[in-house]
Image (tube, rainbow, N blue to C red):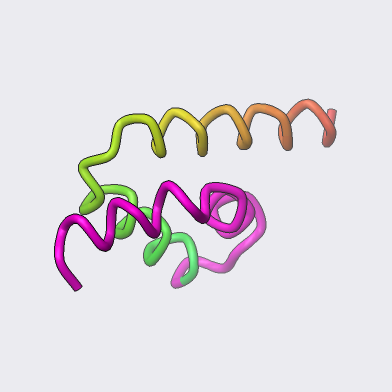
Amino acid sequence: MSGAEISRYAESNTELLSRLLAYGDSESRAYALTVLANSGNVDAIDQVQAELDRIKRELE
């Protein structure tokens, strides 16, 4: 997969990546973080962070 493909995937799947980070096992979280780290897409990272913040508020 090229960097552009990873970036598009991260941007198109921010909700999935957020849920993996919030609820996944350690392997799932590692994969999600790897996708984000290799995407080079700051907007996708910001969207995932916003979704994680929303999930956190729901759990409080």
For the view shown, which residue lies furthest in the left direction? 2
Magenta span of residues:
1-27
Q: Quadrant of the C terminus?
A: top right
Magenta-colored stretch includes residue 46: no
Q: Residue at x 32, y 58 (%)?
A: 35
Q: Position of residue 47 (x, y in %)?
A: 51, 33
Residue 33: x %, y % from top left: 36, 53
Front residue (pair 13, 38): 13
Whether 6 is drawn above or below 25: the answer is: above
* Residue 41 found in image quarter: top left
Counting from the top left corner in percent of width and height, residue 13 is at 52, 55
Quarter of the image for the N terminus: give it.
Answer: bottom left
Magenta: main secondary structure equals: helix
Q: Residue at x 21, y 42 (%)?
A: 40
State left or right for residue 8 relative to residue 55: left
Q: Position of residue 59 (x, y in %)?
A: 83, 36
Which residue sits at x=34%, y=54%?
A: 8
Give residue 25's quadrant in the image: bottom right
Q: Is residue 18 left or right of residue 40?
A: right
Q: How many marks?
A: 0
- At horizontal 25% and vertical 50% (from top left) the residue drawn is 39
Left/right of residue 40 with respect to residue 45 in the rendered view: left
